Amino acid sequence: MEQANWVKRLKQYLLVALIFLLQFIFADKCRLFGVAPNFAFTFVLTVSFLREQKYSFLSALILGILLDAVSGRLFGPYTLLFMTVAFCIREFYHSAFSENFLIEAFYGLITCFITSVCFAFFISLFRGEFFTLISRTAWMEFFYNFVIFLVMLFIQKKCKKKRRSVFRL
């Protein structure tokens, strides 16, 4: 039993490493209207809904620190926002709802919007032009991240249903 738990944890952290590599290498090539998706954010959001609390917090912490380290900007915004997202989803969503796709999508919509506005605010602290950032990039980033989140959430839900199936061999 101990070995199975160890293998499960290893797979989970390898997935976090894969998401970071996907963000670091592939996200820039997926630009749409000059905005790159944030696969790490959408992963943290999805994991916060569907996995245990410890894994969601550790994923948020690891991905936040890694993205802060490679971003070349002020250290801490990614870590702070990812940890806040993981905490808020755990506290507010799981205390009121459970296993409801529409509510999860609604919470994801709100979280993507707030995160895009917060990143625009963090960037505007150094560059200024908050409203220009909102009008040019934040709305597109919000939409892009929300669509990726819905895809990840749908895939995770399907995988979770397959694991629960009575007919699984």
Image: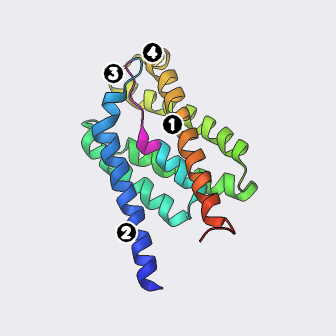
Report whether residue 87 is seen.
no
Q: Which mark is residue 136?
A: 4
| Disc 1 and disc 4 in contact, CB within 8 angstroms | no
Q: Which residues are magenta?
A: 34-41
Residues 125 and 131: in front is 131
Q: CA distance from mark 2 to mark 1?
A: 25 Å
Question: Given the current orientation, which residue lies at the most extreme right position?
Answer: 96
Label 2 SS: helix
- Which residue does the numbered mark 2 point to in the structure image? 10
Residue 88 x, y percent position in the rendering: 59, 51
| Relative side of 123 to 138, left or right | left
Percent across and percent down for residue 84 are 51, 49
Q: Decide: few, some or many residues near mark 4? Use Cα within 10 Å; few <14, some 14-19, many ≥20.
A: few
State the separation of the CA atoms marked 4 and 2. Answer: 40 Å
Residue under the point 57% across and 31% down: 113
Per the rendering, the mark at residue 148 is: 1
Viewer-side label of 4, 3: 4
Q: CA distance from mark 3 to mark 1?
A: 28 Å
Give the distance between the C-alpha atoms of the residues marked 4 and 3, in whole angstroms. 14 Å
Q: Give the amino acid type for the residue marked by disc 4 in the picture.
A: Arg
Residue wearing tag 3: 127
Q: Amino acid at mark 2?
A: Leu
Q: Is residue 48 above or below residue 140?
A: below
Tell me where residue 30 appears, x and y as whole percent.
37, 28
Q: Give the foreground label among 3 and 2.
A: 2
